[in-house]
Image (cartoon, rainbow, N blue to C red):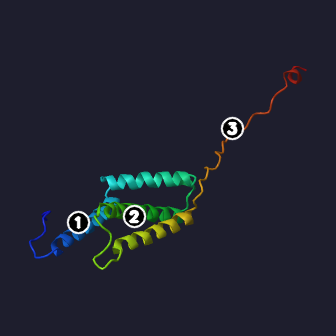
Amino acid sequence: MTDEPERRKGKKAAFTLRTKSYKDGIRALATGISDRRTRVYQLAQEMRVRFARDLGGEENLSEQQHAVLGMAVENLLVVEALGNWIWQQKTLITKRRHVQPVVMERAKLCSAALGMLQALGLERRLPPPQKYVFPKAEPRRDPDAGAQ
């Protein structure tokens, strides 16, 4: 695929190219989350570890919380990618003086991410205190009692 749009009359070709590169970016983001070699996967893991630490540690999360945390991280990465794409645009207003639909979709994704994070809890939790197991102490022998 070349970076130059096909030669067509009007501005439709440039808009088509922009849409395709946006879709390609979302596809790359989706495959990047699952491919451990990519920077996107590494960012997702860093974010997941930080969130888990704020929730009291990986070992203190239930399976349901792990699932919600995974969905929240993926959602936040998509929101961030959409935000970057939006800021690169010259205008967000269409010819009919409407806001680009991607802005509304990003707002919906932000709302969904907020709901997931609220389900996990927004406050920072400390991990439970460590329970140390000490060996049983042998009863003390009184040195004077043994001499008699």
Residue that extends furthest to the right in the rendered view of this protein:
148
For residue 142, which quarter of the picture? top right
Judge the density around disc 1: few (<14), some (14-19), many (≥20) Cα neighbours within 10 Å.
Answer: few
Which structural element holds mark 1? Answer: helix
Query: Measured from the top left, where is residue 79 in percent x and y?
Result: 39, 64
Residue shown at 44% from the left, 60% from the top: 73
Number of numbered callouts drawn: 3
For residue 30, which quarter of the picture? bottom left
| Nearer to me, 19 or 143 | 19
Q: Is residue 101 above or below residue 65?
A: below
| 46 relative to 60 in the view: left or right | left
Q: Which mark is residue 97?
A: none
Q: Earlier in the sequence, mark 2 or mark 3?
A: 2
Quadrant containing the C terminus in the rendered view: top right
Query: Measured from the top left, where is residue 11 in percent x and y?
Result: 17, 73
| 77 relative to 135 in the view: left or right | left
Judge the density around disc 3: few (<14), some (14-19), many (≥20) Cα neighbours within 10 Å.
Answer: few
Query: Measured from the top left, where is residue 13 in percent x and y?
Result: 15, 73
Query: Measured from the top left, where is residue 123 in percent x and y?
Result: 60, 56
Q: Which mark is residue 21?
A: 1
Q: Is residue 63 above or below residue 58?
A: below
| Nearer to me, 41 or 75 | 75
| 51 relative to 31 in the view: left or right | right
Give the Cα distance between marks 2 and 1: 17 Å
Which structural element holds mark 3? Answer: loop
Q: Which residue is mark 3?
A: 135
Q: Which residue is mark 2?
A: 79
Q: What amino acid is labelled 2 in the image?
A: Val
Q: What amino acid is labelled 3 in the image?
A: Pro
